[in-house]
Amino acid sequence: MRTAEQIRESRPGWDLWRDGVVPGDAEHPGEQPAQVAARTDAVLDRIRPLLSDGDVAVAAHGHLSRVLAVRLRLERFVAQGAWSVRCALA
């Protein structure tokens, strides 16, 4: 597994969110954005029915928790008819 700094040495300007995972060796091929989205959607499919009863706690590592939050939040914006989304970076 390589760090972001190590990846940028061979791929200047690389960004995880824009460029996806840099494939590793055969044992660590990495996951492409579409695969992460499919995995995230499977989790959301299990969570959605529970939301009608109240809040749901989900534990995940940093990147996946961000993807879960964004996908669920955007889904709610679309359902409410909001077409513009404002994002603030803290």
Image: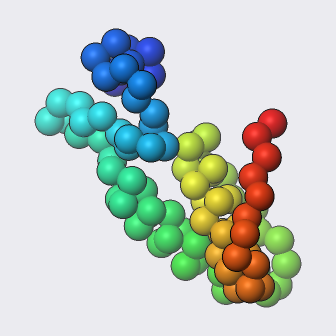
Decide which of 80, 1 is in the foreground and name it: 80
Q: In which quarter of the view is residue 71 placed? A: bottom right
Which residue is painted at 44% across and 43% down in the image?
18
> Residue drawn at (50%, 71%), measured in percent from left and top?
41
Q: Is residue 16 left or right of residue 10?
A: right
Whether residue 76 can be seen here: no
Query: On the picture, is 42 further left or further right than 89?
Result: left
Tell me if residue 42 can be seen.
Answer: yes
Residue 16: percent from left, percent from top:
45, 37
Residue 50 screen position, x and y as percent:
72, 81
- Horizontally, residue 80 falls left or right of residue 39, namely right
Q: Residue at x 74, y 85 (%)?
A: 81
- Quadrant showing the N terminus: top left
Q: In the picture shown, does residue 84 fall above or below 68? A: below
Tally of marks: 0
Q: Is residue 24 left or right of residue 69?
A: left
Above or below, comparing residue 65 to residue 72 in the picture:
above
**Residue found at the very far front of the displayed protein:** 84
Q: Is residue 75 above or below residue 17?
A: below
Q: Which part of the image, by quadrant, shows the C terminus?
A: top right
Residue 35: where, in percent of width, then height? 35, 59
Q: How are the colours assigned in the image?
A: rainbow
Q: Residue furthest right?
A: 54
Percent coordinates x, y for residue 55 in the rendering:
83, 71
Q: Measuring 77% from the left and 58% from the top, which residue is drawn there? A: 86
